[in-house]
Amino acid sequence: MGQHDLLTRAAVQRLGPHWRGHAFLFEAKSPPGYDSSTGLRLLLIFLLLEGVIGPRWSLLRLLHLAVPPSWIRVPILLGLALMLLCFFGQLRLRQIGVYPWRDWSRTEKSEGHGKLG
């Protein structure tokens, strides 16, 4: 670790948790590890959502149905993605970075709220 890294880290630590949250300077969490079969399932989920389902909403026009507006399509795709990750991908939400509130750091809890809870 160089001199610049130490100075930068010290300057960041002097900021309160609230200001670190506004600057997105959250504490590092260890990245999850996946085995190769999980990686393959994640790739298949991505290909299904981005290559098959996502761009195919326009096919509804062929059936003389209205394409839903984006404020409906996006939550549907998000819900489908989360369900596929949990059931087909066999992952817990924690493994993709969705943590319960009780596990958030002080900086994450402070972001946007003005005071710590």
Image (cartoon, grey):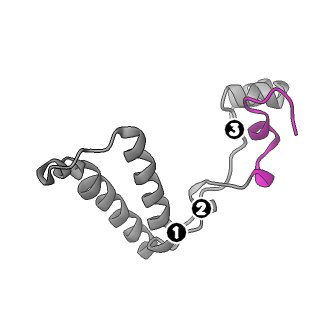
The answer to which image quadrant residue 18 occupies is: top right
Residue at point 19%, 47% (across, down): 58
Residue at point 42%, 76% (across, down): 37
Residue type at numbered disc 2: Leu
Q: Is residue 35 visible?
A: no
Q: Which label was assigned to residue 93?
A: 2
Residue type at numbered disc 1: Cys
Badge 3 vs badge 1, beta-carbon distance below 8 Å: no
| Element marked by disc 1 | helix
The one nearer the camera, 1 or 49, is 49
Query: Where are the magenta residues, as a range?
Result: 101-117
- Left or right? Give the position of 97 relative to 7: left
The answer to which image quadrant residue 4 occupies is: top right
Task: Assess whether residue 116 is covered by the magenta stretch.
Answer: yes
Q: Which residue is mark 3?
A: 1
Q: Upstream in the sequence, badge 1 or badge 2? A: 1
Q: Which label was assigned to residue 26?
A: none
- Residue 91 vs 57, above or below: the answer is below
Q: Which residue is mark 1?
A: 86
- Per the model, the C-alpha gap separating discs 1 and 2 is 7 Å
Q: Position of residue 13 (x, y in %)?
A: 81, 30
Q: Which quadrant of the figure contains the C terminus?
A: top right
Residue type at numbered disc 3: Met
Q: Position of residue 75 (x, y in %)?
A: 45, 48
Residue at point 14%, 54% (across, down): 63
